[in-house]
Image: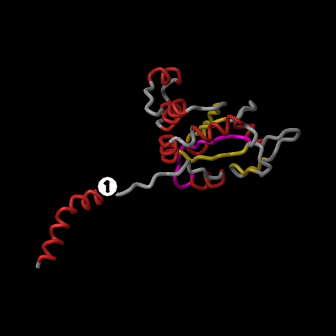
Amino acid sequence: MKNILHILFILLICQPLLAQNKQTPPVAKAKGVNWISLEEAQVRMKTEPRKVYIDLYTDWCGWCKVMDKKTFSHAKVIEFMNEHYYCIHLNAESKDTLVFNGEKFGILEGSNTNALAMDWMQNRLSYPTSIFFDENFLNPQPIPGYLEVPTMEMILKYIAGNFHKNTPWPKWQKEFKGEWK
């Protein structure tokens, strides 16, 4: 009988701890940006249209590596990008042929750059270049250079919230209250 009372007493004491664990299950956090291929983004777009973010980089680009280390490792950036965008990490100098909207793109003659990357950068080579698209790869907005977390937050939210459709960028910059550090 004493053993039963001891067990009941222990259960009574531990019950709040057990209940607390049940109320707050561990949440799996993304380990990084969910980078997908251009082909996969095109397939997903057919069933679940979403904004697209493309990081155009090269293997030799120092600022590209800094952006990978600092911006793309920030928890809020990762969470927001994975929730609102199809994210593509694309080496602009890859020898692979890219297929976009049924058309094939390779390295431009006399260049190290893929023709599609050059088109998206509007013939202005700069690495890294962040390209933001509306759903279905419409309205590409190339932004050259390294983007720090606060700048990335401002742009990600501007495009994802469709503010770019009716709020001029200078007004958005002036009024935006960032939260990510």
Is 130 contained in the magenta span? no
Q: Is residue 54 magenta?
A: yes
Q: Pointer 1: residues within 10 angstroms few (<14), some, or many (20+)?
A: few
133 shown above or below 33 = above
Which residues fall within the magenta stretch? 45-58
* Quadrant assignment for the N terminus: bottom left
| Residue wearing tag 1 | 24
Residue 181 locus on image (x, y percent): 48, 32
Q: Is residue 143 left or right of residue 162?
A: right
**In-front residue for pair 147/161:** 147
Point out residue 24 in the picture as x, y percentages from the top left corner: 31, 55
Q: What element carries label 1?
A: loop
- Which residue of the protein is positioned furthest toward the right in this rendering? 110
Specify the farthest residue to the bottom: 1
The residue depicted at 68 percent of the width and 49 percent of the height is: 101
Displayed quadrant of residue 52: top right
Residue at horizontal 54 percent and vertical 30 percent from the top: 151
Q: Position of residue 95 (x, y in %)?
A: 80, 49
Q: Give amino acid for label 1.
A: Thr
131 lies above or below 37: above
Residue 156: give x, y in percent of width and height. 52, 36
Q: Which of the 4 quarters of the picture holds residue 71?
A: top right
Q: Which residue occupies 15% across, 67% down?
A: 9
Quarter of the image where one finds residue 137: top right
| Colour scheme of the rendered structure | secondary structure
Closer-to-camera residue (77/166): 77
